[in-house]
Amino acid sequence: MTQTSHKHTNSLAKESSPYLLQHAHNPVNWLPWGKEAREKAIKENKLMLVSVGYSSCHWCHVMEHESFEDESVAEIMNDNFVCIKVDREERPDVDQVYMEAVQAMRNQGGWPLNCFTTPEGKPVYGGTYFPKKNWVDILNQLAELWKRSPEEVQEYGDKLAHGMQIAGALPILEDQKSWNQESIKKALSNWQTRMDNQHGGPDKAPKFPLPANYSFLLQYGIFTGNSTVLKHVELTLDKMAQGGIYDQVGGGFTRYSTDKFWKVPHFEKMLYDNAQLLSLYNLAYKHFNKTDYLHVTEGIKTWLNREMRDKSGSFYSALDADSEGVEGLFYIFDEDELSEKGLAEAYAKFYYTDGKALWEGKLIPVRKGSFAELSGELNLSEKACIEEFNELNSNLLSLRSKRPRPLTDDKSICSWNAMLASALLENFESTSDQKSLESANKILHFIENELFNAETGILSHSWKEGKPSEIGFLEDYAFLIQGQIAVYRATQKDSVLRRAKELTDIAIDRFFSLEQGLFFFTAQDQSDLISRPVELSDNVIPSSNSIMAQNLLELSAYFSHTHYREISDRLLAAVENSMIEYPEGYGNWANLYLKKLMGSPELVVIGSEAHSFYSELRMKDLQMFTVAVSQKESDLPIFANRFVRDKTLVYICRNQSCLKPLETIESAKTEINRFTEKFESH
């Protein structure tokens, strides 16, 4: 076998991360994050450069090519700095600390993230992408400043590190918190001033999907009867499903749209986006009953199974935006190419071929309208329209498959896989697709067998080729617990709830601060940072604290565990003001707030006909309910004293109080409908 010869090889060649391996042959003497790098910086009295990115990051590639592959730039970096490369997907804790620092310095952040620190790791200067000239100037100035006035640099690092630690603390709430409908109304009012009611989403570009936000808005619209909010959600989901941000040909969503029309995507595909969007479109399909939304869920699943599944049963992390060094090249089409293959006429039936789809002289597949609209224009039934559309896409996919593919980041991330398992279980609940159930079970089996160390309680964050990372974060526990609760909702197996509780107790022990009333992102025994990061606001992934707060509220009902509910309430109260002021950054928290306003509703069905009762009731929107179902007596606390021989009973409860038990499905449906009465219609 011929071995490729490289002029330069650094310490990253020993790593397994695809992102780190991309930099293994830079002339920069990169080191991975760890003790060795910090000891080297202290011994040599050099500033450190912590450079964070990920394998499918377009501008990471650009900066690498411009600066990190340049020998003259590398010489300056090697002579004056200890240079550390970090895969943000493997070490999100490192990313969070230095992202927070850069945002404090510059009021902005993103990737690539480049943060200069003292030898001890305290941040002193940073930013994101720097053009080569700017980068060289910064390197030289920082090197000179460190030689001339190291005490000045150290003082700034001390102050910033101290400020970051202070910012992480939250007030302890001593009194019982009451939940105010005005808070959610104020939040929504602030939000609506920043909505794009012509194209959907926010009134700015770029546009990120942020599924947690639309999940909240959908639930709010349903439970308040707010038609304005529901129309905005429907508009947004329609535009996304028809736009270039969705891979019409191959299925799956890209990370964001660069414009306000959802036309031109940033072409990388992330597992976490698609897991959440599968869940969102599944929920929207249940409410709006639109064929388009079901088609999207099937498209996401098809793409995942075709391109992202590992033989272990887990799913890969991401697909790069670039192929052959060009962003989006794999996904776009040329009109001559379509004509040559005899596809131009069929293509023009369904997709725009004018300025609504043209990008750099090529065509991004942007659908002309909904299937209902297209079937009317083409004088076809909706079913026939979709069949013809699918046939066209099959031909386009075959054409596309002959091109060089974008890089696949083939590591498996625990939290993202658990997130996908939850979405697949929701899909199974609403469609009865057994493959979704089987796939979710395989993911959870993989996590338990490959990523969880029963002796230490450590859940590894990432895994590749049989090797777990042996470090885990709050988000891994949070999303896995959420996944176990989703298994229970789908299968009613008590054992998975008990497993969820075991994991919750481990998470509380390892991550929760009683003094500050929040969960740290890192465990004390695994943190090697200047401060332990705290994740509160929701971003492209809901914050780990918000997921834990939701989990704790659910489990407090199943196990009658007041302590869980108190932690959840304390967390939610701590972010309430921020949620009101900037709800777009607290969408998952807002969903929890809505549930608290509803009285944390519970639906308990017990008796010999419990499963058939629940099959009827689950056709209603029960997303905000804690659901418990058993055909026999159970020692799960939520069922205590509720079993009556020869009867099947339905208990509907809120705020730890219940209606009298109901004995018919129709009476239960009536009471479920009444849950919206406390909200005003709009």
Image (cartoon, rainbow, N blue to C red):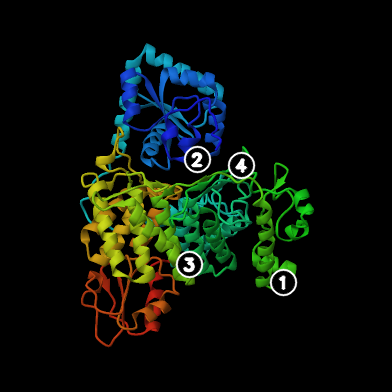
Q: Nearer the viewer, residue 480 or 75?
A: 75
Mark with earlier residue (3, 2): 2
Q: Nearer the viewer, residue 353 or 223?
A: 353
Q: Residue type at mark 1: give it.
A: Leu
Check contact, mark 4 vs mark 2: CB within 8 A.
Answer: no
Q: Is residue 491 left or right of residue 293?
A: left
The numbered dot on residue 380 is 1
Mark with earlier residue (3, 1): 1
Residue shown at 66% from the left, 47% from the top: 403
Check contact, mark 3 vs mark 1: CB within 8 A.
Answer: no
**From the viewer's perspective, is residue 506 above or below residue 39?**
below
Mark with earlier residue (3, 4): 4
Q: Nearer the viewer, residue 70 or 113?
A: 70
- SS category of the residue bearing label 2: loop
Q: Residue type at mark 2: give it.
A: Ser
Q: Is residue 269 left or right of residue 173?
A: right
Q: Which residue position holds label 2?
A: 55
- SS category of the residue bearing label 3: helix
Mark with earlier residue (4, 2): 2
| Discs 1/4, front | 4
Res 110 visible: no
**Category of crowding for the residue at label 3, using alpha-carbon neighbours closer than 10 angstroms: few (below 14), some (14–19), many (at least 20):** some
The numbered dot on residue 268 is none
**From the viewer's perspective, is residue 153 above or below residue 362?**
above
Q: Position of residue 201 (x, y in %)?
A: 55, 52
Q: Position of residue 673 (x, y in %)?
A: 41, 75
Q: Is residue 412 left or right of residue 120?
A: right
- Whole-angstrom CA distance, mark 1 to mark 4, is 37 Å
Q: Which residue position holds label 3?
A: 435
Q: Which residue position holds label 4?
A: 323
